[in-house]
Image (cartoon, rainbow, N blue to C red):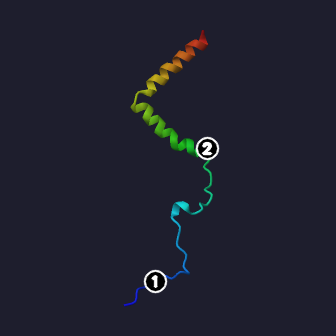
Amino acid sequence: MAAHHSGSTSRRRRPAFTQPQAAEPTRHPAVALAMALPCAVLLAVLFGGWEQMANQAQAVAELLGH
């Protein structure tokens, strides 16, 4: 029985994390904002941050008005 050998002439593949990566196109800041804003609003509503932000905005408006 002969074992199948790949031979010494074949090159071993490097793991994917060591292979050079192609330059990814950069994302436009508006796209990043559109992705993050819904999540931020949801978290603010779920954890009560919305009311706190409204209170802070009202306090700033009062300070500017006086």
Q: Mark 2 points at which residue?
A: 29
Give whichever of 65, 17 is nearer the camera: 17
Tell me: residue 53, above or below residue 25: above
Give the vertical position of 26 relative to 12 (above or below).
above
**Callout 2 touching callout 1 (CB < 8 Å):** no
In the image, 11 versus 58, the foreground residue is 11
Percent of width and height locating residue 44: 44, 31
Q: Which residue is drawn at 40% across and 86% down?
A: 3
Residue drawn at point x = 51 percent, y = 20 percent: 56
Closer to the camera in the image, 25 or 16: 16
Image position of 36 (left or right of 47): right
Q: Is mark 1 on a helix, strand or loop?
A: loop
Instruction: Report whether 2 appears left or right of 54.
Output: left
Q: Dot 2: what SS?
A: helix
Q: Which mark is residue 5?
A: 1
Q: Residue 42 carries which label?
A: none
Residue mark closest to the camera, 2 vs 1: 1
Which residue type carries mark 1? His
Q: How far apart are marks 2 and 1 (CA)?
A: 52 Å
Instruction: Say what amino acid the circle numbered 2 marks.
Output: Pro
Measuring 52% from the left and 44% from the top, which residue is drawn there?
35
Q: Residue furthest top?
A: 66
- Say few, some or many: other residues with alpha carbon within 10 Å of mark 2 (under 14 / 14 to 19 / 20 or more): few
